[in-house]
Amino acid sequence: MFLRKTILTLAFVTAAGVAAALAPPPESKDAKAKDAKDRKEWKSGIVWPEPKVIDPGSANVPPSDAVVLFDGADMHKWVGGDAWEVKDGYTVSRKAAVKTKDSFGDCQMHIEFAEPAEAKGTGQGRGNSGIFMMDRYEIQVLDSYDNRTYFDGQCGAIYKQTPPMVNACRKAGEWQAYDILWEAPRFNADGTVDRPAYATVLQNGVVVQNHTEVLGETSYYQPPKYNKHPARAPIQLQFHGNLVRFRNIWVREVTALVGKKPA
Ligand code: MG
């Protein structure tokens, strides 16, 4: 035992000696100072416009540059909004879908929703609604808490295309939030797709879609397919027979800064 320990200790000492011999000599203070003096900061050379200052808001206050679509008072920003009940700061889906009077392209959207507190129905029949970006690409809203359905049709799915990465649903009746980053598709003049749409979705602060390619319009009956449409289009909230509540809805247009590299 003693012998084994001694051999091990010797091995460590030898290894440490070899490592010390291989290491570069410690830099002197003077050498370090000279190096720092000779080193120049790298700059991209791109001239950027200054990022606009905004107030980011807080949990219940939208950012200062947001387009507020529903602040709890009324649904006047929505076509068909009169049919939806408004009370206690929320609206309830009724009768038919609603869509925004404004149109949006690339955007960030925040929306809170609550499934009917009494969880009735199964599969697609429980708390079904949906956020249709550009009036045709559905991010599913469904009560998927303890309610199984086809995975690419559960809450947080790009409907019938991509399931959410995780099921981050809260219980029926509890308020939940979607934060959606939407990149609109780009079309060529001949109607072909230049660049597909992409969606990033956080449900209750958890990423469920991470820059997911959208394969085309979402339909119950048809495979996904793109049909050329304007660069901006309304956002639709689906009515699917269930009384889903919504509140605190806002959108920010997203525009990348463009920098210039001087010639
Ligand atoms: Mg739906």
Image: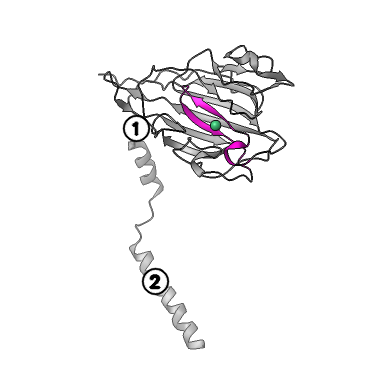
Residue 236 locus on image (x, y percent): 53, 22
Pick the residue in front: 166 or 217.
Answer: 217
Q: What distance separates the C-alpha of mark 1 from that of mark 2? A: 39 Å
Extreme residue in the right direction: 88
Pick the residue in front: 251 or 144.
Answer: 144
Identify the image quadrant of the C terminus: top left
Where on the picture, by quarter, is residue 221?
top left
Which residue is pictured at 39% across the width and 50% down the height? 28
Q: Is mark 1 within 8 Å of ligand 1?
A: no
Pick the residue in front: 193 or 6.
Answer: 193
Which residue is pictured at 37% across the width and 39% down the height? 36
Which residue is pictured at 67% across the width and 14% down the height? 74
Residue 209 visible to an observer of this rendering: yes
Secondary structure under badge 1? loop
How many residues crowd around disc 2 within 10 Å: few (fewer than 14), some, or many (20 or more)? few
Give the extent of the magenta segment.
122-145
Quickly name the residue at label 2. Answer: 15
Quickly name the residue at label 1. Answer: 42
Please name the amino acid that badge 1 sits on. Trp
In reply to whether residue 205 is colored magenta, the answer given is no
Q: Which mark is residue 141?
A: none
Pick the residue in front: 256 or 82.
Answer: 82
In reply to whether residue 139 is colored magenta, the answer given is yes
Which residue is pictured at 54% across the width and 37% down the height? 156
Please name the amino acid that badge 2 sits on. Ala
Extreme residue in the left direction: 263
| In the image: residue 40, left or right of residue 239 | left
Among the two numbered marks 1 and 2 on one chain, the one whose residue lies closer to the N terminus = 2
Q: Do the numbered discs 1 and 2 sit on residues whose CB atoms are within 8 Å?
A: no
How many residues crowd around disc 1 within 10 Å: few (fewer than 14), some, or many (20 or more)? few
Residue 163 locus on image (x, y percent): 49, 41
